[in-house]
Image (cartoon, grey):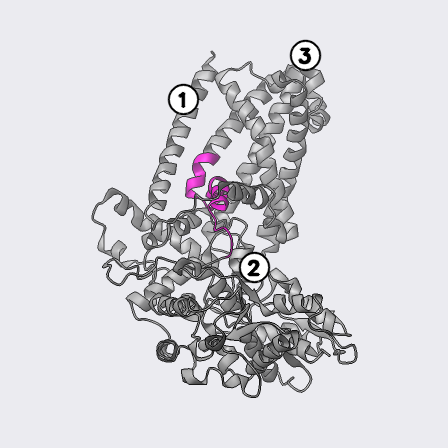
Amino acid sequence: MTIQNYLFILLFLAAISFFLSNLKKIISFVKLGRPENRFDKPWKRIKRVLTVGLAQTKILRDPVPGIMHAFIFWGFVTLLTAVIEAFIQGFYSGFSLTILGPVSKILFASQDTFGLLVILSVLFALFRRYVTHPKRLQGDGHTNKDAAIILFMILGVMITMFGVNIAKIHLHPEYANYYKFHYISSLIAPVLSASYADIVYAISWWAHVVIVLFFLNYLPYSKHFHVITSLPNVYFSKLGPQTLETEEINFDNENVFLGAGDSEQLIWKNIFDGYTCTECGRCTAACPANITGKPLSPRKIIMNTRDRTNEKAPYLVKNIDMPSEVQEHKLVSEYYITDPELWACTTCMACVKECPVNIEHVNAIVDMRRFLVQSESRFPEEVMTVFSNMENNGAPWAFPQSDRLRWADGIDVPLAADKQEFDILYWVGCAGAFDARYQNVSRSVAQLLNKAGVNYAVLGTQEKCNGDSARRLGNEFLAQMLIKENVETLKQYKFKKILVTCPHCLQTIGNEYKQFGGDYEVVHHSEFINELIKENKIQIDDNKKIDSKVTFHDSCYLGRYNDIYDEPRDIIDLVNKGEQVEMRRSRDKGLCCGAGGGRMWMEEKIGKKVNIERTEEALSVNPDIISTACPFCMTMMNDGVKEKGKQEDVKVKDIAELTWDSIK
């Protein structure tokens, strides 16, 4: 061994020890969070890592910066071979990847290819961040400085790798048959005089390993720690529908979860999200609240969580007294995350959908709302009325429970209590029962079911609010009370499926009732009507088809939550002779109407109204009809059209209404 080997070994051991010490500290911070099992279904999780993590499918949703980042990521993965070779040479100077024979030729060619791609991508990233200044990348000085340090270190790793490769070509002619596959290095090699090859090799090799080790130990102090945590974070992300279930409340238990007022009260995955955030701003750029001037920034929520964890966790881990100012700086407070930020969220899941590393912003926000409602009794005044109505009337409105079936006046609608056993339970929902405009949708659905000869029934006055708004507004006590009452009611009857017109009912009953023993197959009316048409149980009359320019507004809870995009559009195509046009933001990139997350019941006092932003986007394609498949969306789009003075020119109609108007 040479003096170089001894020096490298000392440097390597010191660097790795320091890194592992920081890694252990961060893991201890993450473990402070509430437990939740994220170790189930390993093969599904591995598949997600392969698609989202390695294939970079989500980062490529924004193609230009996505391709840039993908090249850097794939380059790093590929160029690990060059780093490993350099490190092994630190222990044994004579090592070379040429021992792999033909495989080494592929590795050398890939090193040069991806080395060049990474250099070009880094230069583009620097130009984009510091010259074009995209809005979502505008942060504080620390963020920009951190990004510059990382980008220049990546550039340094690539340049020194090429320096090593170029020098090797001169120093080891016996491997010429292998090194010629360093095809870019071979093109540059003639520029270097062979007499300087030793010096260039030594400088490049040492610079390469020092930059890599410094880079590794800088990561825990940087937003680029996601280099380490992104793949694990994708692995541990929620599988299946994005649900908001939490611990079942046992009122005899003194340790009832009252919400997350501080970082350690979040689940451990939310804390881990903080250390995985790339600060790319994709979440904030997609957030309807932020777009319309509200104080909410999903990126800031995650960054604040990380910052608060770093402030408080060292004292909790060591179990020592913390200074009074640290105790006062709670996560949900004026020091980090304020009430207006949390109440601005529409729970539309756009932030989660856009996040390239599967951070779960919405679950954390709802847990913090639970703290405000259940621990602090601190919430917007109008929400109190909604809670009271739900508790006393079983609905967000003040209508009595006895009026639940008035929407069906004049229509033959069978009651579950009279039939006991049937195929389809039509869950009308609160809006379908009480909202004057959406009652027509309920009537259209019931008449379609009658026309198709479906064996169905409704609960009528036995039905109560599904608990969606209560849960997303943070009143988990009330939500679970409603859920359990509904589950007990449903146990009285035998049926095969539940049919809903409200995507919020679809999400809550279909995906979140399971925790309380309510495991049902729930279908949305867009799916069900589509099937009725395909099975020829209802027939479209060509003479009754509409002839209009129609645009469809995607409900967040139908689309991003439940992946239903095609069925409503298929129905529109079947009942319409005219053109169906898409808005600029549609399908899984669609903009929220502004009513989700309990915002339906709250006033927008800051910035532009979300429904106006969405209505303007809909009107920009000059439609005759804006079609919806959600009662909240219908209300918000109707209000938007009226506010823009277009109610005489543009109609807002549910797909059920379009279908009923078009059948024989």
**Main secondary structure of the magenta stretch:** helix
- Is 570 part of what is drawn in magenta? no
Q: Where in the figure is residue 456, as x and y percent of width and height?
A: 55, 73
Q: Which mark is residue 519?
A: none
Q: Image quarter for residue 653?
A: bottom right
- For mark 2, what is the residue? 135
- For mark 3, what is the residue? 174
Q: Image quarter for residue 530?
A: bottom right
Give the magenta-colored segment's residue range: 215-241
C-beta proximity under 8 Å, tags 1 and 3:
no
Asked if residue 248 lies left or right of residue 171, the reply is left
Going by the numbered disc 3, the residue's amino acid type is Glu
Going by the numbered disc 1, the residue's amino acid type is Leu
Q: CA distance from mark 2 to mark 3?
A: 53 Å
Q: Which mark is residue 10?
A: 1
Asked if residue 501 lies left or right of residue 4, the reply is right
